[in-house]
Amino acid sequence: MSPSITVQVRAETDPATVDITITGLDGVTIFTVRAQPPGEPPTPVRGAIATTPTSSAMIIPDLAPPLNRPTVYTLAYLTASEPTTPVEISAPAVTVPFTPDGDAHHVITDPYTGLTVVCMLLSDDDERTQSANYSALRPIGSANPVVIFDARQSDTGTLSLYTRTRAETLALVDLLAPGRPIISRHDNDACDVAAIEHLYPGDAVRNRRTRRGDRIWAIDFLAISPPDPQLVTGLVTLYDLSVHVPGTLADIAAAWDTLLHLAQARWGQ
């Protein structure tokens, strides 16, 4: 049985979410699911990024799908017989309905819990910075500097939001409190800002506008790649090494012959 993918909109949530059902995973070694609205690059779905199947059929929720846009979900998978060339199949396009409440067109979602806050984007200036990534050397005697350069860094900027009620304000406070990445979405398909953006929120300043509990927000952000539960970065210090491997650095080198073996050690056990 070949793999197949079907998509169903769960309209009971507000905004709606999507259930992605994948069957026929016997023989599949790894798979990725991507969502692609019209005119935009595909975005990997959290929980389905280079995932190893745990059963022949799996249901993966997309807690933050594009809004009011026909979106195609594509499954790319590898098998034991084809370990390097991915096979891709797509489900028919689905549209997640979203009815803005007045001027509240902006949606902030916690990809870990699905907690969502609908709020108002205060302005459409959306100033962003793509910082250059370079080092300029000015050797003595050289008329011009020598520049070592690399690809520009991700977008940085500030989200200017307005939470209209005390309930919206407290919901956004709770959403930002854990310090995790967030997903920013909007339903304007005419602008150049992507329908889905994964952001890491920095400092979040909120000013009270009235005594009713509404707030004006300025949230610094850094655009990032979609976070995935399987991609966890661990931190090991020299102290950890000294606790787990008594002795000298030579003893540690003797215990692990490569850095890969060192990285794969189960430090929490």
Image (cartoon, grey):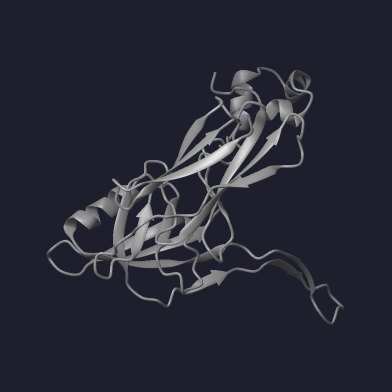
Give the image quarter of residue 233.
top right
- Compared with 209, 74 (above or below) is above
- Compared with 125, 54 (above or below) is above
Give the residue displayed 57% in from the left and 38% down from the top: 4
Q: Position of residue 98 (x, y in %)?
A: 33, 59
Give the residue displayed 47% in from the left and 62% down from the top: 195
Q: Position of residue 88 (x, y in %)?
A: 65, 45
Q: Position of residue 161 (x, y in %)?
A: 32, 66
Would residue 92 appear left or right of 212 to someone viewing this image? right
Residue 231 makes an appearance in the image:
no
Residue 67 makes an appearance in the image:
yes
Give the residue displayed 23% in from the left and 56% down from the top: 168
**Quadrant assignment for the C terminus:** top right
Would residue 143 appear left or right of 45 to someone viewing this image? right
**Quadrant assignment for the N terminus:** top right
Q: Residue furthest bottom?
A: 143
- Compared with 76, 79 (above or below) is above
Q: Residue furthest right?
A: 141
Q: Position of residue 182 (x, y in %)?
A: 42, 52
| Total tally of numbered discs in the picture | 0
- Compared with 174, 257 (above or below) is above
Q: Residue furthest front?
A: 1
